[in-house]
Amino acid sequence: MTTMTKSPAPSRTARYLDEAERYSAHNYHPLPVVLDRGEGSWVWDVDGNRYLDMLSSYSALNQGHLHPEIIAAAREQMERLTLTSRAFHNDQMGPFLRELCEASGFDAALPMNTGAEAVETAIKMVRKWGYEVRGIPDGQAEIIVCEDNFHGRTTTIVGFSSEEQYRDGFGPFTPGFKLIPYGDADALRDAIGPNTAGFLVEPIQGEAGVNVPPDGYLRETAEICRENGVAFVADEIQTGLGRTGRLFCCDWEGVRPDVLIVGKALGGGLYPVSAAIADAEFMDVFRPGDHGSTFGGNPLGAAVGRASLRVILEEDLSRRSDELGTWFMEQLRAIGSPHVEEVRGKGLMIGVVIKETSGTARPFCEALQQRGILAKETHHQVVRFAPPLNVARADLEDALMEIAAVLS
Ligand SMILES: *Cc1c(COP(=O)(O)O)cnc(C)c1O
């Protein structure tokens, strides 16, 4: 793979890095690479170096960069109508929500833009359902969440994070959330009280380091929720839309959540599109004026969402993710690296855990960048590999050689 070998950061890259350093808030710690072009699984930097994108913008690019069908849909829609607000109807939102409901098997969907907004939507939905349907006393509804969760960055959401840095300096926080250990169904059973309205959970915790819960955890917790009249809310913003080898990660255990939250790849890497999806029992708690978003359900986003979903279904990206992911994980384990504690994941959502004695994951990601592979550490010890789901097997084979070199 000589075409992927890098020289040290030259001046164009350095100039952009300086500018970003000077003018941006320092709320991220990106790898020192400045990209200006993408196609499929590949991106190029401002100095013309090519990289395999093995992050896919945290799984917002399951369909790859600049998917022609998604770009065409966006382009066509952009020349017709982009925004109506929800004060008026448009001809894209209805078909988009119908297609989303047909694919997921629910009655209705409420469109938003970012993932965090869809999570907030689900929280409001479950609380109001708790009061109106379950009869929880006013102001008492409680939602159970898991340690090491990541559901976004709004003040309400970071308020129930167990990660000190996400919270530190941002309080006071919204009350009404209770933390339990992830992967422990008994902990949920013990935590449920008379005012518990919902259980909000990631089927696999992505940002926490690709934490895969024990087999049966989703089925068991969903069952506990059902027995107790508690809403089971699955945040599939990262795990959904094919990423783990099924359309939704809950499908692995035959679990149908009460509320399903999607985002990221629903926008095809082009435009922020998210939704909270549920049956009428939950969705009907919303009445005109209860909730909304200026851009949510706009015709451009809806057209992009339709194309993004169609590509995932038509290209059978869930099956691809399953096959490639199973094989890729086996190959990663076969490297037998002395630095690797564990390789874990499902489909093409894979975490390589670096042993503490070998330092953090960051230098490994920097070394991969030098070899033309973009991956990002998550939570210090984990290198996450999550390429677009239509990545070519041959490109993954080439990448494996570079990864093996870096891990050895
Ligand atoms: C990315 C993510 C979010 C937040 O989505 P944004 O679009 O960044 O607001 C929420 N939940 C999960 C599981 C995520 O991975």
Image (tube, rainbow, N blue to C red):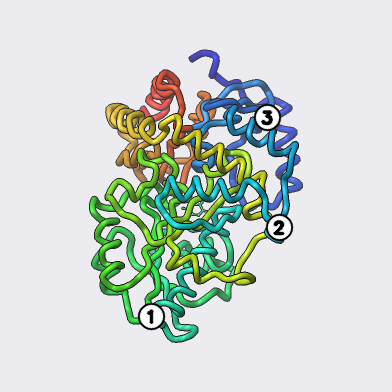
Residue 100, placed above or below residue 145: above
* Contact between labelled residues 2 and 1, with CB atoms less than 8 Å apart: no
Residue 253, placed above or below residue 175: above
Secondary structure under tag 3 reads: strand
| Camera-nearest label, 1 or 2 | 2
Viewer-proximal residue, 354 or 308? 308
Instruction: Say few, some or many: other residues with alpha carbon within 10 Å of mark 2 (under 14 / 14 to 19 / 20 or more).
Output: few
Secondary structure under tag 2 reads: loop
Instruction: Say few, some or many: other residues with alpha carbon within 10 Å of mark 3 (under 14 / 14 to 19 / 20 or more).
Output: few
Residue 32, placed above or below residue 229: above
Of the numbered discs 2 and 3, the one sitting upstream in the chain is 3
Viewer-proximal residue, 97 or 264? 97
Of the numbered discs 1 and 2, the one sitting upstream in the chain is 2
Question: Which amino acid type is shown beneath numbered disc 3?
Answer: Asp
Percent coordinates x, y for residue 333 in the rendering: 29, 32
Per the image, the residue denoted by label 1 is: 195
Q: Quadrant of the C terminus?
A: top left
Tell me where residue 66 sits by quadrant: top right
Instruction: Say few, some or many: other residues with alpha carbon within 10 Å of mark 1 (under 14 / 14 to 19 / 20 or more).
Output: many
Label of residue 85 in the image: none
Question: Which amino acid type is shown beneath numbered disc 2?
Answer: Phe
Tell me where residue 232 sits by quadrant: bottom left
Per the image, the residue denoted by label 2 is: 88
| Camera-nearest label, 1 or 3 | 1
Percent coordinates x, y for residue 315 in the rendering: 45, 29
| Camera-nearest label, 2 or 3 | 2
Tell me if I can see residue 358 in this picture.
Answer: no
Secondary structure under tag 1 reads: loop
Label of residue 36 in the image: 3
Q: Rounded to the nearest whole Å, what is the CA distance between mark 1 and mark 3?
A: 51 Å
298 horizontally vs 217: left or right: right
